Image: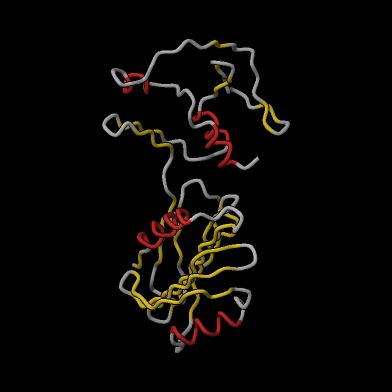
Amino acid sequence: MNKKWLVSAIVCIFLLGNVTGAWAGSAWKEVKALFNPSIKVELNGQEMDGIKALQYNGNLYVPAKSISDYFGLDSKFMFDTKANKLTIGGPMYIDLSSPDTMNFYQIIINGNWRPSILSANHSLYSNYYMGVEFSLESAEGVSLDDYVKKTLKTPLSYVQVNKQTKTKIAEADARVIDYETTDTIGKLVFVQKDSDIVTLMFFVDKTRYQASDLKEYDKIIASFNIQ
């Protein structure tokens, strides 16, 4: 079972600690639930020690903080009483650098995504249907246009370009490509700073794609930073 799916499925559950005080006087209604300390929680064949459950209206509820701690996820909790909003965890920062450059590149991504590639100049983070690949390469004496043309021939020959736009990102020259492959839809971004070329490939599984998914891409681009 995917970790993000599991955590999302249990977000609407009871929380332990002093949150109750923050909710006092709100529109929340008091309910009666049963607590049985003998209930055990097992996930994929492994018993989860220290996880307690409540039974209410025919459903079992477990504490989100305990589940996120179990998976090693960011378990920071904050409840904004004015906005009536519960925030669990936070975003993650991806940094890229290289011994061949003095520049430092950073993006902020969804805090529920997990890495499958991690190095100083190449990272890939995703959930089960959406993610971003972020990489840095030195291209001394190569123009951005030539680099993009070459890259689209190989190694990205499998990409179908639907639209290409010249723009500026973090005050640097950039190319944004709306693309699709046999499996994904997304945005491919090339940014040139000095002799560096930064490539950002945002992707969404075709079978699950919705236009609203591009809000994640917008957040990433808005966070792009060069130092």
Q: Is residue 119 above or below residue 3?
A: below
**Is 144 positioned to the left or the right of 151 in the image?**
left
Q: Residue at x 55, y 34 (%)?
A: 9
Residue 116: x and y, percent?
60, 56
Q: Between residue 72 and residue 77, name the one nearer to us.
A: 77
Looking at the image, residue 17 lies above or below residue 94 = above
Please, which residue is most extreme toward the right here?
45
Quadrant containing the C terminus in the rendered view: bottom left
Residue lying at 45% horizontally and 68% vertically, measured from the top left? 97
Residue 117's quadrant in the figure?
bottom right
- Residue farthest toward the left in the current orientation of the protein: 82
Numbered disc total = 0
| Left or right, 193 with reference to 153 | left
Across and down, in percent, residue 34 comes to 54, 10
Q: Quadrant of the N terminus?
A: top right
Q: Residue at x 45, y 77 (%)?
A: 164
Q: Going by the image, does 22 lie left or right of 13?
A: left
Task: Work out whether residue 51 or residue 158 is closer to the camera in this orientation and state it.
Answer: 158
Q: Residue 58 at what x, y percent from top left?
A: 59, 16
Identify the residue shown where x is 39% and y is 76%: 174
Vertical arrangement, residue 141 with respect to residue 223, above or below? below
The vertical placement of 142 against 205, above or below, is below
